[in-house]
Image (tube, helix red, strand yellow):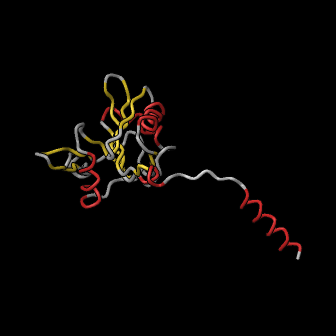
Amino acid sequence: MKRIVIYIILLAVLWLVPVKGSDVGKLQPVEVVFIYRDQGQIIMETDTKDKGVGATVEEALANLKDTTPGIIYLDTAEYLLLAEDTTDVAEQLRRILKKTVQICTADRGIDLSLVARFLPAHSKLPQFKQWQQGEVLPHLTKYQNRLKISRKSLDKGGFL
């Protein structure tokens, strides 16, 4: 009997506690995140055409959130693309992105909305949790308005 009274009190307290919700219409779910450097700044760009700039990943992410006309939702990110000169900052992203995000390097100027459609159908990339800095990643390139993935061949030592 005492338990029932305690449960009722707990439910009443939880019901009375104010909770600030999010307007789902303002969420910007992201599928692809691309990190590159430009003039000494780190650029974080998404497939939703949003962009953040900063001296560090944290500053770029803060700028991304501040300049987006909605609420950036990185929990939906499935792919992380890194310019070859930014693999050193990938470690800073481990606490921001989920561990199952698939990762590769990519050329600048790739249409990220095209990447979001291409990668699920054509590739299984290494997951962020499996990748260690210094390991060679598959590379995504633009080829005549199409995309192509080059993979490291273990037996030949080159790219396929």
Q: Position of residue 148 (x, y in %)?
A: 18, 50
53 lies above or below 135: above
Across the whole image, how many numbered discs are drawn on residues?
0
Q: Is residue 119 left or right of residue 98?
A: left
Give the residue at the far bottom of this rendering: 1
* Residue 147 or residue 76, whichever sits in front: 76
Q: Quadrant of residue 100?
A: bottom left
* Residue 40 or residue 70, whichever sits in front: 70
58 lies above or below 46: above
Q: Position of residue 41 (x, y in %)?
A: 37, 25
Q: Residue at x 57, y 53 (%)?
A: 21
Q: Residue at x 30, y 37 (%)?
A: 83
102 lies above or below 7: above
Q: Quadrant of residue 60?
A: top left
3 lies above or below 146: below
Q: Position of residue 36 (x, y in %)?
A: 33, 34
Q: Quadrant of residue 49?
A: top left
Image quarter in which the N terminus is found:
bottom right
* Residue 72 or residue 134, whichever sits in front: 72
Q: Position of residue 40 (x, y in %)?
A: 35, 23
Q: Residue at x 47, y 55 (%)?
A: 24
Give the residue at the far left of this rendering: 144
Give the residue at the far top of this rendering: 39
* Residue 95 or residue 113, whichever sits in front: 113
